[in-house]
Amino acid sequence: MISKETVLAYVDGELSHEEALAVEAAMTSDPALAEEVARHLQLRDAAGGAFAAVLTEPVPERLLAAAREAPSERVARSALVRRFGPPHWAAMAACLALGVLAGYAIPSGPVVSGAGGLQARGALARALDGKLAADEGPVRMGVSFRDAGRAYCRTFRMDREALAGLACREDGRWAVRTLAEVRPQAGGDYQMAGSAMPPAVLAAMDQMMVGDPLDRTEETAARAGGWK
């Protein structure tokens, strides 16, 4: 039986040649596995297209400085993320809600804690309201989709804060469901394309998405309708 961890590694191109062949052989006799792989590939490609422009950008100095001088609590959270692998992504999302999200829920930050939970505010809320996936800026949109309750959800990346996350429209506001740090890749490359998105964001998107991601026409229509 092919595990979900192996499927994700296959989609990310992290398996050896022999391991990849084993997955492909299993897909020929397991339609459910083939469908799962196709879904993950679609998610990767959708996210990769949304963030493709970042691959040609220089590394922002403020992000390199933040990575070099990270406070101890941020280092501790990064260690927590490294400790847990893909099988623990659902639990990680809960940990992020209690830990990382709480750390950024401050009056001047992009996320505020309200009566209904954690909400996007300021530039993040405005970007979620008005930006499309291809739009440039310090806050970039990724994949937009509907969840099981037909609410609109969107992934995003904030360059200045070195954060990525997922928020869903709820009662006229954007409820932040997942928030994770974006760390420079090995060698200092700062990328957020495709599968380089934080595992917690990919896991939340995979768990919550119903149907296909919105294309540009659907995304534009959803924005015009106020994401209702």
Image: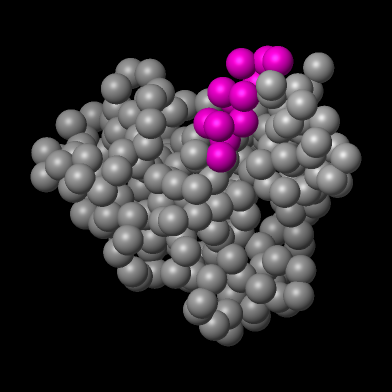
Magenta segment: does it hold 143? no
Q: Does 129 appear above or below 157?
A: above
Q: Residue at x 61, y 16 (%)?
A: 31
**Chain part drawn in magenta:** 29-41
Residue 180, position in %: x, y?
58, 49
Of residues 195 and 201, the one nearer the viewer is 195
Report which quarter residue 186 is drawn in: bottom right
Q: Residue at x 21, y 54 (%)?
A: 130
Magenta segment: does it hold 36? yes
Residue 182, position in %: x, y?
61, 59
Residue 137, position in %: x, y?
35, 70
Is residue 208 in view from this perspective? yes
Quadrant in which the C terminus is drawn: top left
Of residues 180 and 111, the one nearer the viewer is 180
Is residue 125 in view from this perspective? no
Number of numbered tags placed on the structure image = 0
Q: Main secondary structure of the magenta part?
A: helix
| Extreme-left residue of the structure | 224
